[in-house]
Image: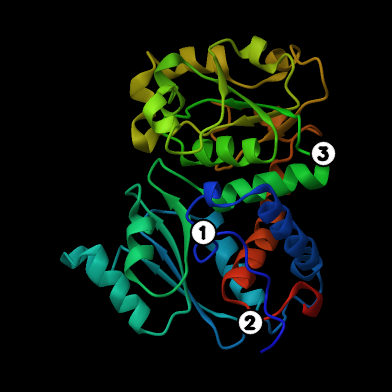
Amino acid sequence: MTNKIKPLTNFRNLLDVDQLNKSDINYIFEYADKLQSIAKGSIRKIPALRGKTILNYFAEPSTRTRVSFENAGKILSADVINMSSSGSSDEKGESLFNSVQTLESIGANLLVMRHFDAGAPYFVARNIGIPVINAGDGSHAHPTQNLIDLYTVHKKVGNIEGLNLTVLGDNVHSRVARSTIIGFSIMGARITICAPTTMDAQYLSDNSVERNQIYWPEIKYSDDLRYSLKNADLVMTLRTQFERKSNYVVPNINEYTRLFKLNEDSLKSCEKEIKILHPGPVNLGIEIDGYVSNSERSLINDQVQNSVAIRMALLLLLIGDYSLDQI
C-alpha cells in the first residue's frame, strides 16, 4: 500500500525506551490519542492488522501485560497466539534460540516477549526476522509500561518537561524503574529515587565509564521519604518484588513499610498537588495504602485504561500499513 506509517528512530523493534527520542514518544502519543476512542468505543474492531499474526510469548507469569497486548491485537483484527514456557518445548530442554526460530516459522508477523533473563529479547531480535517488543526482561526493562505511564501523565497532568518525579521503592530489582528513569528523563522530568540504600541501583549512574558509552540521566538519591516527596509533582511507587528476593535486602518488611510506605501521613510532606503512579500489581499495605491508591490523586486506574491504546499504537507502528490519517 502507499502512504505507509511514518518510520520512527531505530524502530524496527521496541526493546527499551532509550532507542526513542522525545519526538518519537510524542508521535506514539498521537497514535494512541486516535486509537483511544476505538479501544473505549461500542464497536471495538478495525481491520488495520487483518491478516497479521501476533505471538505473545510469556516465559514469566503476567496478567495485565499479556491481556493488554492480546486485547490490542484483537481490536486491530490481528490473529493473536498466546504461548507460555509452561507446557511448551522449553520444558523439554529446547533452547531459546530454537524456540523462537520455530515460532517465527509458523508465520508470525510480530513477537511480544516477556522473559526472566535480562537481555533475552535483544538476543531474539538479533536472530529472527520479525519485530520484537520487549514486554519485560528480568530486572532490566519494561518499555511499554513506561510509555503507558508517560502517556497517562501527558493526558492527566500535561507537559512532562520540568516535572519532579520521585521513584519510590525497590528499584534494584525493578525493570519498570530503569525504563521509567530513562523515559521520563527523555521527556524532561527530574528524577529522585527514594529507597533503602540496599534497594538503590546506584551503580547504574555512578559508573563513569558506562556513562561515556550509554545514555543515563542524572539522578538524585535519598533514603528520606518525606524529603523526597516535598517538591515532587509525581510519585511512582514500585512493587516490592518478593519473587526476586527483594525482602532479603531489608532487615524486615515491617521496618520497610514503616519508613517507605506511601500513606496519608507521608503525603503531608508534599508542597504540591502530587499525582500517584504504580505499574502494578500492587502489594497493598506494603508499598502503598489502599486508601491512597484509590484516592483522587491516584492515576493507577488511568494507567490500566491507557495500556491498550499505547500497545495498539506500537503494534500499528511496527507492522501496520496505514498512516495516522487513514485510521
- What residue is shown with label 1? 14
Labels 2 and 1: the sequence-earlier one: 1
Q: Are marks 2 and 3 in contact (CB under 8 Å)?
A: no
Numbered disc 3: secondary structure? loop
In the rendered image, residue 32, in percent from the top left (x then y), is placed at: 73, 61
First reached walking from the N terminus: tag 3 or tag 1 = 1
* Between marks 2 and 1 in the image, the one whose residue lies nearer the viewer: 1
Query: Tag 1: residue type?
Result: Leu
Residue 11 percent location from the top left of the image = 55, 63
Specify few, some or many for label 3: CA neighbours under 10 Å numbering under 14, 14-19, or 20 or more: few
- Give the left or right position of residue 155, taking residue 290 as reference: right
Q: In which quadrant of the rendered view does residue 309 lie?
A: bottom right
Amino acid type of the residue that numbered disc 3 sits on in the rendered structure? Val
Q: Which mark is residue 157?
A: 3
In which quarter of the view is residue 219 placed?
top right
| Residue 184 spot, x, y in % from top left | 64, 38
What colouring method underlies this structural image? Answer: rainbow
157 sits to left or right of 65: right
Q: Is residue 88 visible?
A: no
| Disc 3 to disc 1, C-alpha distance | 26 Å
Label for residue 77?
2
Mark 2 lies on a secondary structure that is loop
Whether 166 is drawn above or below 125: the answer is above
- Lateral position of residue 83 relative to residue 218, left or right: left
Q: Earlier in the sequence, mark 2 or mark 3?
A: 2
**For residue 318, what is the image quadrant?**
bottom right
Please say whether residue 166 is visible from this viewpoint: yes
Name above or below for residue 226 compared with residue 127. above
> What label does residue 190 carry, if any?
none
